[in-house]
Image: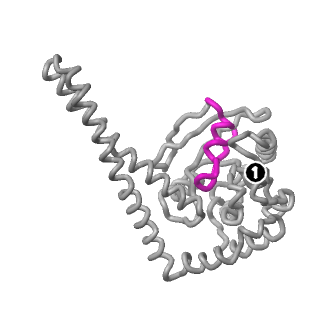
Amino acid sequence: MKHAALLGMPNTGKTTFFNRLTGARARVGNWPGITVELMEGRILLGAQMVGVVDLPGIYDLHGFSDDEQVVRHFLERNRVDLILLILNATQIERQLSLALQVKDLGVPTVLLLNMADEAGKLGIQIDTPRLAQCLNMPVVLFSAKYGQGFPQAKDRVAGALQAVRAIPQEQILKRFSSDDQIEDQMVRILRESVQLPVQMSDRLTARLDCIMLHPWLGFPLFFAVLWLVFQSVYSLGAPLQYGVAWLLEQFKLDVLQPALSALPPIAYGFLVEGVYDGIGTVASFVPIIILFFLFMALVEDSGYL
C-alpha cells in the first residue's frame, strides 16, 4: 500500500478535500513521534490501495509552531510516497512559498489549487501547465466545496502515485532554499504563470505591508493587533455572556427547580446543581468563543498572519 500526506495552509479547504476523497472511510490514528491525533483514511485509487493522512495546516515548513513541528516530525519518521499540497488559488501570490518549500523536500508532489471558482470571480488567471513546469509537479485547479474539477484532481493523484518511486527517508527535510531564494523564485513564477487583477497589488497594499511587516515595527504592531482582537472579543462578548447566563438562571428558577423539586435531595443536587449548573457555566462562554474564532478568521483571511 502506498501512502500520501495531505498538506496545506489553514483555511485552504484541505479537510474538505480529505473528506470528499476518503468519504466515510476516515478514522483517527496515532503516529510515531506525534503528540496529536491525525485523521487518516484508505481509498482505492486506480488499482492500488492508498493511505491518506490529513496533516495540520501550516504556513511554513521552516517555522517552530507546534503544528509545523508535528508536520516535520511526521515527514521525517513516516513513509510518504506522495504529498498532496492544497493551496488557496485566490491567495496564490502569498501561498506559493509553501509549494517551493515542499518542492525542496524531493518528495513527489501534486499541487491542488482549491477555490478555483472564487479565483475566477476575482479575475485571477492561472496558467496551470506553465506553473506545473516551473514547479516540476502536476498542478490541478478545483473546488473542494462544489466538486468542480475534483474527478480530474483524483485522476491526477492516482497517476502520480502510479509513477512514484521510493524516496530514501534520510533525504527528506535535508535541504532547503533560503527565504531570499524562495522570494526570488516566487516573483519569477508568478510573473510567468499567474495573472492577478490590478486591484490585488495596489499601492495601498504595498504601503501597508511596509508598515505592518517592518523589521522593527512589525512585532509591536502585531501584538497591538492581537490586543485589539482580544479587547474586542471581551468587550462585545461580556454582555452576551451575561445575557446567556441570565437566561439559563431564569430557566433554572422558573422551570427546572419547580419541575424537579419533588426529587430526593441527592438526585436534585446532581441534576440541578451538578449537571445543569456545569453545562450552564460552559454555555455562557459560547458567545466569547464564537466571537474569538470570528475575529481570528478575519485576521487570518486578510493574509496578515
Q: Write down the region rendered in magenta.
A: 1-24
Q: Secondary structure at mark 1?
A: helix
Q: Which quarter shows the C terminus?
A: bottom right
Q: Residue at x 28, y 31 (%)?
A: 251
In the rendered image, the residue lying farthest to the right is 129
Q: Residue at x 60, y 76 (%)?
A: 209
Q: Nearer the viewer, residue 193 or 160?
A: 193
Report the number of numbered marks: 1
- Which residue is labeled 1 in the image? 116
Q: Percent x, y for residue 94?
A: 66, 65
Q: Residue at x 40, y 67 (%)?
A: 227
Q: Percent x, y for residue 178?
A: 65, 74
Q: Which quarter shows the N terminus?
A: top right
Q: Residue at x 43, y 71 (%)?
A: 224
Q: Percent x, y for residue 254?
A: 24, 28
Q: Is residue 6 magenta?
A: yes
Rendered position, 246 above or below 76: above
Badge 1 density bin: few <14, some 14–19, many ≥20, Cα 10 Å: many
Amino acid type shown at disc 1 = Ala
Q: Nearer the viewer, residue 126 or 3?
A: 126
Q: Is residue 97 magenta?
A: no
Q: Percent x, y for residue 184?
A: 73, 76
Rendered position, 97 above or below 31: below
Horizontal side, residue 284 vs residue 188: left or right: left
